[in-house]
Amino acid sequence: MEKEGFVSKVHRKKPHFKPMPRHIQRSNAGKSVIRSRVEHVFADQKSQTGLFVRTVGITRATMRIGLANIVYNMRRFLFLERLNAGT
């Protein structure tokens, strides 16, 4: 991965029977911010739109996921518009 310029976004575990080093704590905290934002999107799509892809063919699956993403983005946009209208 490193040879290709990619950086690992996987959390590092605490050493057994030792305190977690400060630099690893900071690294994990930064990764958690990104992870929580992404996982909230997936959870919303799964709960609100009932996204469970069970189609024949990659084209139909891609289309279904794409439509779910559009619905999520529209709902998010409307939420943010209402939020700004109140201020």
Image (cartoon, grey):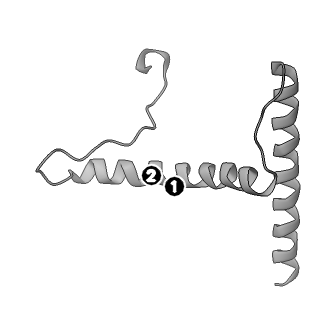
Residue type at tag 1: Val
Q: Secondary structure at mark 1?
A: helix
Q: Is residue 86 above or below residue 71?
A: below
What residue is shown at x 38% (from left), y 43% (from top)?
Answer: 11
Horizontal and vertical percent position of residue 35: 53, 49
Judge the density around disc 2: few (<14), some (14-19), many (≥20) Cα neighbours within 10 Å.
few
Quadrant for the C terminus, please.
bottom right
The part of the image, by quadrant, that contains residue 78 is: bottom right
Q: Is residue 74 left or right of residue 3?
A: right
Q: Secondary structure at mark 2?
A: helix
Q: Is residue 56 above or below residue 52?
A: above
Horizontal and vertical percent position of residue 43: 66, 53
Horizontal and vertical percent position of residue 39: 60, 50
- Judging by the rendered image, the residue that carries numbered circle 1 is 33
What is the number of the mark on residue 51? Answer: none
Q: Is residue 21 left or right of residue 53?
A: left
What residue is shown at x 87% (from left), y 51% (from top)?
Answer: 71
Residue type at tag 2: Gly
Horizontal and vertical percent position of residue 23: 27, 49
Residue lying furthest bottom: 87
Please report contact status of discs 1 and 2: CB closer than 8 Å, yes or no.
yes
The part of the image, by quadrant, that contains residue 48 is: bottom right
Quadrant for the N terminus, please.
top left
Q: CA distance from mark 1 to mark 2?
A: 5 Å
Q: Is residue 4 left or right of residue 53?
A: left
Q: Nearer the viewer, residue 59 or 24?
A: 59
What residue is shown at x 45% (from left), y 30% (from top)?
Answer: 7
Judge the density around disc 1: few (<14), some (14-19), many (≥20) Cα neighbours within 10 Å.
few
What residue is shown at x 12% (from left), y 51% (from top)?
Answer: 18
- Judging by the rendered image, the residue that carries numbered circle 2 is 30
